[in-house]
Image (cartoon, helix red, strand yellow):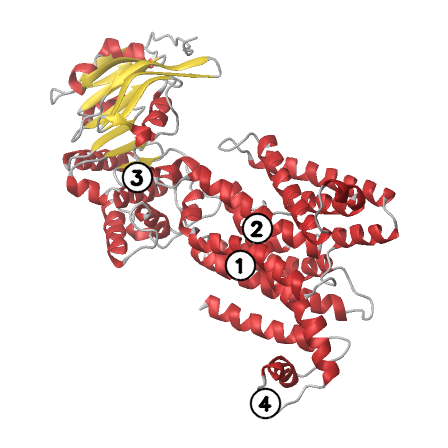
């Protein structure tokens, strides 16, 4: 659906993305991992159409994304950003209803039903009538997830669309982190391409189908999560020495070694 | 429900505005004066003098007050949505001052301008006010870091600086102005509906109507804009076009209003806030309700400015502040108390 082909991004003389080619697959949860400043957000901005690549191409269904009408794209592509201003606080239900804007400027009865279902699925129905600024960070995140679910309702039914999640677990407690990623998996199971920026390598390892490791603006590795999330690659991507710790059930988690050294990371110049 | 209530209040305020003044005219006779020219007979009869006062002086003034109030309130709604900043109103960020400075400059240099641009001051002044307002918005945007990187404090600081600059400019113009021009410039500095006539009212409505229609039509898009430009774009909103149109139409409405009523602060800041405190930030309600409340507040303030210390007329901006500020504080206090429970 969305594809980046040999994409470079140079801004203010700094190379933020260097020769990245990737295609998040439909029906799979792809996690993007990398240290701070590695270029994860830049990739998201390219996928959102917020930035144009300096060179290379961003494609949507095989043709340049800029040739596709924004309105049409917004019915198949949704974003849950990390920071969303609450200067003018809507009620949670009103906010989730904005997800129907690409479909109908004024909501129909069906839109209201879709939004109620989305709020229920995101476990946000209990506080649907509360103002967003009175909710905790995690509750807000669930409301924004409900908005994205409402936005992609039809795309999900058709099994074709993309959901971009920028650090979706940032404000969530452990239980809701699990729930958020299980929901992301479920959406991928419905046929969406779900791309999530995560910082928790163990959450990523537990839930991801595919993984992309970004290091200094380059795509260090991408593909099946089980193959990509290896100790050496992760240590390089995250600038920290990691070691695998086996669990009794045969799975493993990654822990920083006690002798780790922090290697400051810059962008390419 | 709120809109109906505001509409009823508006009718009451308009009747009050028409009724009260140096000569008090009862509502029945107001109606009679308005419908007599149409050949409709009522149980009441308006005397010729009453009809003249109503139709030639009071009605245009009340009409202008209602339209200007709606335009100022809508300017506030649009600017606050655009800047995602509750403090952004056309007065605070310098749009009104920029418009007033341009209008004042146009008046003082009218003879010289007439040599270059062969247009009547009736047209030239609102065009200059529009251009002054537009230029100020663009300057604020640039000083605040441009679209997308706008910082709230930068917007306000830029607004404060531009207000001060415009104030200094108006002061300088007053130094070189002759008596008649100085009266005109003073008129813009303090706000006044005394120049109302039907032509002015119609011109202000023509300049403000596009903003109102825009606000109504694109209210859902303005809602999306409150989530941030990136999110709005992901919801399919053509953000740049929306912002450009909002700025253009706000400058047109505010420039036109300032050109004929002078600087009337406070309405654009407080009216949208009051409505938001009652209904929330949804522009589908906020736009019509703010327009209605704005068109209530300004004629009401004008009645007070005309009658409080008659025959002296107080600056209308002073009255809007005196009415609005305590009301706003009470609402804020009520909200704080509700949230504390």
Q: Which residue is mark 4?
A: B41
Q: Quadrant of residue A31?
A: top left
- Circle 3 packing at 10 Å, graded few (<14), some (14-19), many (20+), is many
The span from disc 4 to disc 2 (Cα, nearest Å) is 43 Å
What's the CA distance linking mark 4 and mark 1? 36 Å
Whether residue B84 is visible = no
* Chain designation of label 1: B
| C-alpha span from label 4 to label 3 | 59 Å
- Distance, label 2 to label 3, CA atoms, is 29 Å
Residue in the image at 52% along x and 48% along y: B78
Task: Please say if A199 is above or below B335.
Answer: above
Q: Quadrant of residue B159?
A: top right
Q: Earlier in the sequence, mark 4 or mark 1?
A: 4
* Residue A1 falls left or right of residue B149: left
Q: Give the numbered dot on residue B155.
A: none
Specify whether disc 1 shares its chain with disc 3: no
Cα distance between the residues tagged 1 and 3 = 30 Å
Label 1 or label 2, whichever comes before in sequence order:
2
- Identify the residue under disc 1: B290
Same chain assignment for discs 1 and 2: yes
């Amino acid at each position: 659906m969305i594809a980046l082909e040999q994409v470079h991004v140079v801004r203010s003389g700094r190379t933020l993305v260097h020769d990245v080619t990737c295609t998040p697959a439909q029906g799979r949860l792809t996690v993007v991992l990398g240290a701070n400043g590695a270029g994860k957000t830049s990739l998201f901005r390219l996928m959102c159409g917020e930035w144009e690549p300096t060179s290379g191409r961003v494609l949507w269904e095989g043709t340049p994304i800029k040739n596709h009408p924004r309105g049409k794209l917004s019915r198949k592509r949704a974003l849950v950003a990390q920071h969303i201003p609450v200067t003018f606080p809507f009620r949670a239900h009103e906010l989730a209803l904005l997800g129907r804007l690409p479909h109908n400027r004024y909501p129909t009865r069906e839109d209201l039903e879709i939004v109620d279902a989305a709020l229920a699925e995101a476990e946000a129905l209990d506080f649907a009538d509360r103002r967003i600024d009175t909710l905790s960070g995690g509750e807000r995140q669930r409301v924004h997830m409900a908005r994205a679910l409402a936005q992609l309702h039809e795309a999900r039914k058709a099994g074709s669309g993309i959901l971009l999640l920028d650090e979706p677990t940032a404000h969530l407690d452990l239980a809701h982190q699990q729930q958020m990623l299980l929901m992301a998996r479920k959406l991928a199971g419905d046929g969406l391409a779900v791309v999530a920026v995560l910082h928790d390598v163990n959450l990523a390892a537990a839930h991801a189908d595919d993984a992309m490791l970004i290091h200094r603006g380059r795509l260090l590795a991408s593909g099946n999560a089980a193959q990509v999330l290896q100790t050496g690659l992760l240590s390089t991507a995250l600038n920290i020495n990691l070691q695998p710790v086996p669990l009794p059930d045969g799975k493993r988690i990654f822990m920083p070694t006690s002798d780790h050294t922090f290697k400051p990371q810059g962008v390419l110049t | 429900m709120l809109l109906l209530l505001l509409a009823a209040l508006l009718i009451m305020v308009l009747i009050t505005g028409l009724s009260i003044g140096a000569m008090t005219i009862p509502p029945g006779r107001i109606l009679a004066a308005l419908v007599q020219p149409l050949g409709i007979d009522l149980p009441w009869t308006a005397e010729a003098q009453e009809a003249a006062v109503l139709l030639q002086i009071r009605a245009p003034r009340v009409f202008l007050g209602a339209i200007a109030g709606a335009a100022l309130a809508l300017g506030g709604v649009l600017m606050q949505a655009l800047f995602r900043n509750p403090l952004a109103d056309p007065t605070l960020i310098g749009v009104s001052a920029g418009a007033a400075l341009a209008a004042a400059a146009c008046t003082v240099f009218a003879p010289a301008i007439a040599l270059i641009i062969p247009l009547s001051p009736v047209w030239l002044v609102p065009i200059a006010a529009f251009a002054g307002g537009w230029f100020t918005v663009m300057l604020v945007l640039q000083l605040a870091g441009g679209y997308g990187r706008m910082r709230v404090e930068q917007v306000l600081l830029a607004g404060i600086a531009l207000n001060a600059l415009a104030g200094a400019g108006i002061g300088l113009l007053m130094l070189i102005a002759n008596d008649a021009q100085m009266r005109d410039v003073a008129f813009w500095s303090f706000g006044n509906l005394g120049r109302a006539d039907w032509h002015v009212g119609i011109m202000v409505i023509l300049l403000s109507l596009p903003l109102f229609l825009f606000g109504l039509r694109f209210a859902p898009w303005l809602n999306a804009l409150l989530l941030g430009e990136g999110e709005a774009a992901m919801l399919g909103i053509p953000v740049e076009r929306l912002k450009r149109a909002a700025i253009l139409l706000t400058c047109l409405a505010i420039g036109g209003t300032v050109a004929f009523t002078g600087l009337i602060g406070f309405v654009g800041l407080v009216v949208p806030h009051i409505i938001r405190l009652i209904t929330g930030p949804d522009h589908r309600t906020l736009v019509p309700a703010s327009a209605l409340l704005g068109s209530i507040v300004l004629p009401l303030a004008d009645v007070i400015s005309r009658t409080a210390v008659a025959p002296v007329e107080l600056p209308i901006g002073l009255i809007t502040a005196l009415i609005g500020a305590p009301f706003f504080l009470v609402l804020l206090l009520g909200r704080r108390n509700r949230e504390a429970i």
